[in-house]
Amino acid sequence: MPRWIRDNALSVTMLGAFVVFLSLQSVFGWQTHNEELAEYGAASIDWLTYLGSGHFAESVFENWESEFLQMGGYVLLTAYLVQKGSAESKPEDQSDRPEDDARRAGPDAPWPVRAGGLPLVVYRNSLSLALLLIFLGSFVGHLFGGTAEYNEQQALSTGAPRISAWEFLGTSEFWFQSMQNWQSEFLAVGVLIVLSIVLRQHASPESKPVTAAHAQTGA
């Protein structure tokens, strides 16, 4: 196996799976959408046109939105909250890691750490900030994609006038779509936090060592 692949196998595998599943989603979504159009007697659309449709945008960004909210919230909350015995929590008595102290930085530390001031403040929180910014972008994508899809469905079924994204933001439909995903994401993380207290996965950094006591906190 080439060295680069071996060193980046986890990210390559995850992103490769993402590309495969997103491609399959687009194909099956395109077929599903054309079936819906046929039910209303409307003309079918080609695959490239579908990629720019509200149907596809809504389905993609609706899920991205919940995933990045979950991850951003999780990263931020684990900086302040603990769960005794969980591999997903920092130890109860650890308010901050020694390595997080910029005064201990060596010459190989990232530039913002050596620069100090505002760059350091931003860098200290950059992971949660990046995840939450992607969440906000996905939220906007879901809003505009959902608006386009809602307007298309209304035009096909009732001939109702188009509404704006701001108006769609106030509908129960938009928030129903969001909440059904948000609740499942936080349930999954909560279950992982609790199960990691008593269950193990050999060799995984998301698990405590197999021999660790249930009360041990952190992996």
Image (cartoon, rainbow, N blue to C red):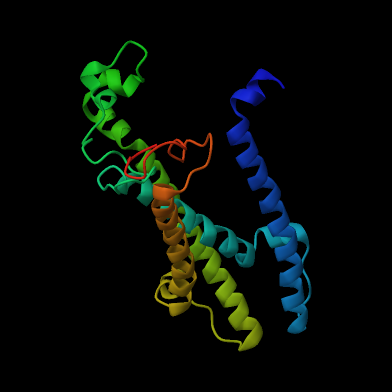
Q: Nearer the viewer, residue 64 or 194?
A: 194
In the image, taking residue 78 as reference, residue 66 lies left or right, namely: right
Residue 49 location, quadrant = bottom right
Q: Is residue 62 above or below residue 114?
A: below
User: From the image, which quarter does the C terminus lie in?
Assistant: top left
Q: Is residue 15 left or right of residue 31?
A: left
Q: Which residue is the extreme one toward the bottom? A: 158
Q: Position of residue 2 (x, y in %)?
A: 70, 20
Residue 149 in which image quadrant: bottom right
Where 77 sits versus 112, above or below?
below
The location of residue 38, given as percent across then percent down, is 78, 79
Direction from residue 102 to residue 149 in the image, left or right: right
> Which image quadrant is residue 88 in?
top left
Name the residue: 70% across, 65% down. 29
Q: Position of residue 81 (x, y in %)?
A: 26, 48
**Residue at x-position 36% and y-position 40%:** 213
Question: Residue at 24% of width from left, 22% of height from top?
Answer: 102
Comparing 141 with 207, the one in front is 207
